[in-house]
Amino acid sequence: MNEIILKLKSIYDKYKIIIILAGSILLLLVPVIFPKSYIMGIICRILLYIILAGGLNVINGYSSQFCIGYAGFFCIGAYTEAILALRLKINFWLLLPIAGIVTAIAGLLICLPTLKLKGKYLALVTLGFSEIVRLIALNWSSLTGGPMGLKGIPVPKIFGIEFKNSLSYYYIFLFLVAIFLFVTRRVINSRIGRAWMSIREDEQAARSLGVDTSMYKALNFMYGAFWAGIAGAAYAPYTRYIDSTFFTLDEGFNILSMAIIGGMGTLIGPVAGSIVVNLLTELLRPISEYRLVAYAILIIAMMWLRPQGLFGASKSILAGKEIVKKARKAEKEAAA
Amino acid sequence: MKVLLEAKNVSKHFGGLKAVDNVDMVIYEGDIFGIIGPNGAGKTTFFNLCSGVFPVTGGEIYFNGENITNLRPDIIAKKGMARTFQNIKLFNYMSVLENIKIGFHIHSRTRMWDAILHTSVYKRDEKLAEEKGMEIIERVGLKDYKDILAGNLPYGMQRMVEIARALALDPKLLLLDEPAAGMNPNETMALMEFIKKLNHEGYTIAVIEHDMKFVMNTCNRIMVLNFGKKICEGDPEYVRSNKEVNEAYFGKGIVVQGGTM
């Protein structure tokens, strides 16, 4: 697998401009190639989950804070957009960043009391948070419509074009995915991304090198939450109707499984994870609820065969075993 | 001589255990200061107090004239104190160069928007980390290994990466916790030379070490701890001939009829 990746990479480096150009033209033409709204619906789902799994991957994969209640942030973003659009008639394009910022603040609020928690303890707090958010959405009827949900969320418009079905909405999702990948790539390859990774690898060492770990962990959580908010804000006008059942814990686990299957700690991992899991969901539709069993088998098989995920770099935190083995071998050779 | 690090009556108790008990210590600028003592003497705990990993139970620590008692480790690092760890703490799944780049964290100030927009601040920081990082890597002789994951290197090299990473902070004081542990005699010799060279270049160094040859040959002043207490401080000759130190290491002579054995 690694050799294949390396080979692909060398081909990519050679024809970089051509590949990027052809790729973007192809991506722009997708609705023309698949004019069926069923297929475009699946593709839109894939794009939406790329943002979600990618945002979660920034938290879980890069700074190794284990968040499993990511659906809570998704929920906050979606409701923020829906409520503000319905009540105050604020423009969708303005609501995107607003929802992102509101969700990031929610991320900060949950993160502050939990900065000292690690691993499973933090995971439990985020789990509880996700449920609390969902229950608020379910029970605060005057604001969120309660079990009736929010109906008739206005569709986004730009230059007189209405994005009212999956064929046109595809471009909004594509635009957001492109921005997400571009921005995240730049952040990860900077001092900030390195600080996050140093926290993942060894928090004590990071502190001894002058990294304010509490601040960077909070920033990391906010960054991840921000993109969940954006995804939520893009999702609400897409379905035009939201209620609390969209944002259950299962949704959180669904996003998490994409991040894990794709490979944590890489940019491309969640993209692959989203494609694989969403396609599987469609392919396995005939066996209905048994597909959950299929997921379980897939995740177990992945842990067994490729613990770092499909595209997980060997530096992924889940790839520990192989590296330790290699290191022992190198040590033995050095000793001999 | 200027005092760089001063500990006044520093204590650390873990419950009833007095890991460090009323220790006074002064490190002057330009020193290679050795801290020795039998296992469990409290050497590493003392280092942890100086670098802010634990809060002290009592006493005060001054660094460069400033009271740094109970400050956070990252703040102390920013003030110019870098350290390595007894059990190596490298960023295992990052390359050697990336490890060292994190050492430049306190010398850079890229913010989120700088990174996203690739502003001049970002470009300056990346250039600094890349160029100075390579410089340090060449100095410690790890140029050929710069893209290898730090966790894959053999033990002795990992120690050097850790020292290189600490050097990236450009510290006034470098605390080395058992830098020669797990090194073979050749590597230890090279490390000794390297530490002396760093000292010539103006770094003040404090080192915990078990290897007596190493300590006696590199340090100009030595402090001996035993059961958390300071039992001796002075130059190598003085420490070598000190009775209490000998007793701590070798035990007391038994009094038999007619004299000592």
Image (spheres, coloured by chain):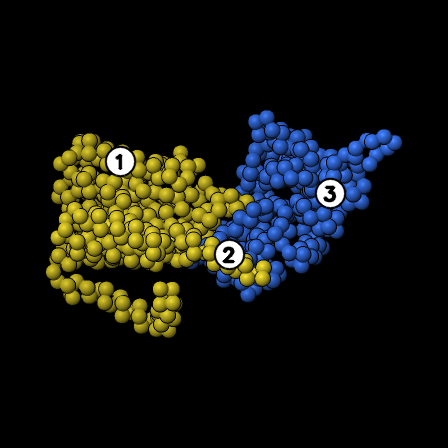
Chain colours: A yellow, B blue
Q: Which mark is residue B133?
A: none
Q: Is residue A299 above or below residue B47?
A: below
Q: Residues within 10 Å of mark 1 (few under 14, many from 20)?
A: some
User: Which residue is disc 3 drawn over?
Assistant: B222
Q: Position of residue B228 (x, y in %)?
A: 66, 33
Marks 3/2 same chain? no
Point 15% across, 38% down: residue = A149
Single out the residue that lies furthest toward the front. Answer: B257
Point 59% across, 53% down: residue = B159
Q: Residues within 10 Å of mark 2 (few under 14, many from 20)?
A: some
Secondary structure under tag 2 reads: helix
Q: Amino acid at mark 2?
A: Arg
Quarter of the C terminus of chain B within the rendering: top right
Q: For the residues marked 3 and 1, what is the alpha-carbon distance in whole angstroms?
A: 59 Å
Q: Amino acid at mark 3?
A: Ile
Secondary structure under tag 1 reads: helix
Q: Is B167 on the left-hand or right-hand side of A38?
A: right
Query: Which of the 4 quarters of the picture holds residue B33?
Result: top right
